[in-house]
Image: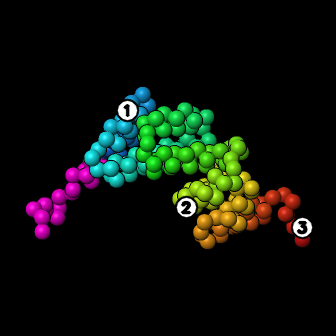
Amino acid sequence: MTDQSFDEEPPEHLRYRRYLQDLENVPETDEATLVATVLHDPDVSMSEAAVNRYLECWAADLLTDPAFTAWAQTMAMAIGDRPFLARRLREWSLLRAIALDEPWTAEELTTASDWFQRTATVVLVVTSPEALSLLAERGRTRRVRNAASRRLQHSDQHQPDSIHKS
């Protein structure tokens, strides 16, 4: 046993909650500095989890907003060489490209993480039949392939050409 009471929270949990609160309330002008500060915490897993949660909230909110690009560039600089966070930010950018019908490649889509492929099949702003077809055929997991297939079938059923007259 340790000397720590069961009622006491580990210090990294307290810091995690404080980081989330600080990130939630940070002014835009201090955002990159705070992200970099959080990432200097000695508990790498905890600090990256806090920053990832922050990225996910903002990326989802800004996904189709023109401000996304500048925000993502700022975050990329703040994140630096953190592989997981850099990949997640790239995948949010790919999700944006698909949602806005901007250029993307089949290789980017099929080599993206399971998280990305699952997200792409459930985020309703991704309506690209090409992306959904690719995921239905070549998604990494059965769950992704099935979800993409359902999205395609659902969109086909709501097309004016598929309305059946009785």
Mark 3 lies on a secondary structure that is loop
Amino acid on which the number 1 mark rests in the picture: Thr
Contact between marks 2 and 1 (CB within 8 A): the answer is no
- The relative height of residue 27 versus residue 146 in the rendered view (above or below) is above
Mark 2 lies on a secondary structure that is helix
Magenta stretch: helix, strand or loop mostly: loop
- The answer to which image quadrant residue 10 occupies is bottom left
Mark 2 — residue?
Answer: 114
Residue 111 at least partly seen: yes
Nearest to viewer (mark 1 / mark 3):
1
Q: Which of 129 and 47 is in front in this view?
A: 47
Amino acid on which the number 3 mark rests in the picture: Lys
Nearest to viewer (mark 2 / mark 3):
2
Please state the horizontal and vertical placement of residue 103, each as a whole percent of the image: 70, 43
Question: Marks 1/3: CA distance?
Answer: 60 Å
Please state the horizontal and vertical placement of residue 143, each as a whole percent of the image: 60, 69
Check if residue 95 falls in the magenta segment: no
Q: Residue at x 51, y 49 (%)?
A: 87
Per the rendered image, the range of residues in magenta is 1-16
Q: Residue at x 55, y 58 (%)?
A: 113
Please state the horizontal and vertical placement of residue 96, each as a whole percent of the image: 62, 45
Which of the labelled discs sits on residue 165, or is there none? 3
Q: Which tag, 2 or 3, sits closer to the chain's start?
A: 2
- The relative height of residue 157 versus residue 76 in the rendered view (above or below) is below
Mark 1 — residue?
Answer: 33
Viewed as shown, does residue 164 lie left or right of 147?
right
Q: Nearer the viewer, residue 87 or 98?
A: 87
